[in-house]
């Protein structure tokens, strides 16, 4: 089976992400993690950039890692000497070869650029180090010149050439053709470095491998200059999963590595990011979840599993959930629900979803607690029909409740210091004729953060004979959740009273 090398540049191009700078202790931990992950080469930094960068590369080069350590350098003696002094195994030199960059940045003739590149390769090889050469902006460089400079460095003894798509303008078919042409022209191993300006970095890297590239330059989570680089985890799993091309990556550490880079870089991994994103193996919609519960391959690629990349499959709750998954999530958490209650729970989940509320597992459990604790319809003395609550800075909070109390229609209204108080006073009025009640405890929690969090209300209600009952209500609306909890407690106390009378 074919094996492709992985050259990780998280510590170099990844650190060029605007706003990212890894202190030395972070760099050491990242290098150790990359080594554990099994990358073949770690580009540890650009030693000429600063004293700290030099020290970091030197420290990493001396950690005794299995991965080769590479240092980046311009084709400038100072930079190359700094890279050699950093004791890195490999020196990666680069120089502009495209017309636009030659004219506006390096300002040298094409012949001089070739000569400088050749001299630099020879200098590095004379120092006994591995040498990689990059023709910067290769994908905007005239093909004849590109072939000429790569051939010249090959003849000078370069160990590997890199073809960078510096500004991310390559497209998969064109990049495939370019790498194929270079592959036919050269004998040295070919490495590619793709930027993601058009979201094609992974596709281009993949195309290059199919065209014969031997190594891929990648960063964890795809961080890097501008829109970033090809993401290590995506490239590796595409090659493994879809083409059966091996790398030395121990894929089970991919999520762990991604989380470390997310934490150290401060660049959040989007939940929908392939392979490592929180949702990469999550299923919310009922039809998918139903299939996945039977066999995950129904709605996952199948050639990769969450375990392979250190992830977890999640069946999650939400607006699009179906009965099978709600039942499974509840059963896994120890709740037993019959079909009738499942329908009720499902209705509440859908109702919240339709209001735009994100429903979490914790929300589901709160809903289930309420529904499971509910009395049957025929056992309820009070059945609420309609609730209206008015509040504002210029009116006294007022609540009106239409309900059926022991079979008779009843409307009550009450005022209070706030909308919840007004509503609870209206409930007391409702119960009034049948039972005097006192609220001895009222507690409210937001289950998840945010102003749209589901509220969970706990109440303890005491009747005129000193019996008390604690009930809960849950909902996006705190007034409705409070009413639900109190009515539930009152109904329970009334049922107990009725039962005692019969005994
Ligand atoms: C595509 C890439 O990712 S390339 C790597 C990019 N990474 C970085 O630039 C990060 C580290 N860089 C740095 O710390 C600084 O830019 C340094 C220390 C390297 C250089 O700083 P300065 O000397 O102040 O130069 P500055 O960055 O402003 O300009 C770049 C200089 O390098 C020259 N240069 C650029 N690329 C090369 C090259 N491959 N070989 C030789 N010279 C080069 C430019 O022509 C310019 O030269 P000039 O100062 O004579 O005009
Ligand atoms: C140094 C080179 C390889 C680079 O980062 C680029 O061209 O994007």
Image (cartoon, grey):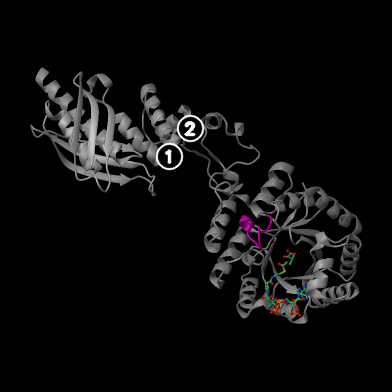
> Is the residue 398 above or below the residue 157 in the image?
above
The residue that mark 1 highlights is 359
Could you tell me if the residues under marks 1 and 2 are in contact, i.e. CB atoms within 8 Å? yes
Q: Can residue 364 be seen in this view?
A: yes
Q: In this view, does 146 lie to the left or right of 332?
A: right
Of 384 and 359, nearer the camera is 384
Looking at the image, is mark 1 or mark 2 earlier in the sequence?
2
Task: Give residue 131's mark.
Answer: none
> Is the residue 12 above or below the residue 51 in the image?
above
Of 368 and 297, nearer the camera is 368
Task: Decide: few, some or many residues near mark 2? Use Cα within 10 Å; few <14, some 14-19, many ≥20.
Answer: many
Residue 258 placement: quadrant: bottom right
Q: Is residue 207 left or right of residue 157?
A: left
Q: Which quarter holds ligand 1?
A: bottom right
Magenta: main secondary structure: loop
Q: Is residue 233 left or right of residue 388?
A: right
Residue at image location 61% in from the left, 55% down from the top:
221
The residue that mark 2 highlights is 321
Q: In this view, does 157 lie to the left or right of 66?
A: right
Q: What stretch is highlighted in magenta?
A: 220-230
Residue at image location 26% in from the left, 48% down from the top:
393
> Is the residue 309 above or below the residue 468 in the image?
below
Farthest residue to the left: give it: 465
> Is the residue 391 above or below the residue 215 in the image?
above
Relative image position of residue 454 (x, y in whole percent) = 36, 42
Residue 381 placement: quadrant: top left
């Amino acid at each position: 089976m074919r094996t492709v090398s992985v050259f990780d540049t998280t510590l170099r191009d990844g650190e060029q992400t605007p706003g990212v700078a890894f202190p030395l202790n972070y760099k050491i931990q990242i290098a150790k993690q990359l080594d554990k992950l099994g990358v073949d080469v770690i580009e540890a930094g650009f030693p000429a950039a600063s004293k700290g960068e030099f020290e970091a590369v030197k420290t990493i080069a001396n950690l005794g890692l299995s991965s080769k350590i590479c240092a980046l350098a311009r084709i400038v003696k100072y930079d190359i000497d700094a890279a050699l002094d950093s004791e890195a195994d490999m020196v990666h030199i680069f120089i502009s070869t495209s017309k636009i960059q030659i004219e506006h940045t390096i300002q040298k003739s094409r012949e001089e650029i070739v000569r400088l590149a050749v001299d630099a390769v020879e200098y590095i090889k004379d120092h006994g180090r591995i040498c990689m050469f990059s023709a910067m902006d290769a994908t905007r460089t005239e093909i004849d010149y590109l072939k000429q400079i790569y051939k010249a460095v090959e003849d000078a003894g370069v160990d590997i050439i890199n073809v960078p798509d510096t500004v991310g303008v390559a497209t998969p078919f064109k990049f495939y053709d370019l790498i194929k042409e270079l592959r036919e022209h050269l004998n040295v191993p070919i490495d590619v470095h793709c930027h993601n300006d058009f979201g094609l970095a992974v596709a281009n890297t993949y195309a290059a491998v199919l065209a014969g590239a031997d190594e891929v330059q990648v960063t964890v989570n795809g961080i890097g200059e501008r829109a970033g680089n090809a993401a290590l985890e995506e490239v590796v799993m595409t090659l493994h999963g879809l083409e059966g091309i091996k790398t030395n990556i121990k894929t089970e550490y991919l999520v762990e590595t991604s989380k470390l880079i997310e934490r150290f870089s401060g660049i959040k991994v989007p939940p929908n990011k392939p392979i490592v994103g929180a949702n990469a193996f999550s299923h919310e919609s009922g039809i998918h979840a139903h299939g996945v519960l039977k066999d995950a391959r129904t709605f996952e690629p199948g050639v990769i599993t969450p375990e392979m990349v250190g992830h977890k499959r999640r069946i999650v709750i939400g607006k699009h959930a179906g009965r099978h998954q709600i039942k499974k999530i509840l059963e896994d958490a120890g709740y037993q629900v019959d079909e009738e209650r499942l329908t009720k729970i499902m209705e509440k989940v859908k109702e919240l979803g339709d209001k735009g509320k994100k429903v979490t597992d914790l929300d589901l459990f709160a809903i289930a607690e309420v529904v499971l604790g509910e009395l049957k319809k025929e056992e309820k003395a009070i059945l609420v029909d309609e609730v209206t609550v008015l509040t504002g800075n210029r009116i006294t909070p007022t609540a009106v409740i239409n309900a059926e109390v022991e079979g008779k229609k009843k409307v009550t209204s009450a005022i209070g210091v706030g909308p919840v108080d007004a509503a609870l006073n209206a409930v007391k009025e409702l119960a009034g004729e049948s039972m005097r009640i006192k609220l001895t405890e009222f507690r409210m929690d937001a289950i998840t953060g945010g102003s749209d969090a589901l509220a969970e209300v706990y109440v303890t209600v005491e009747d005129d004979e000193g019996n008390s009952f604690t009930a809960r209500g849950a909902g996006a609306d705190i007034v409705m959740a409070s009413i639900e909890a109190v009515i539930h407690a009152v109904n329970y106390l009334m049922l107990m009273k009725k039962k005692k009378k019969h005994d």
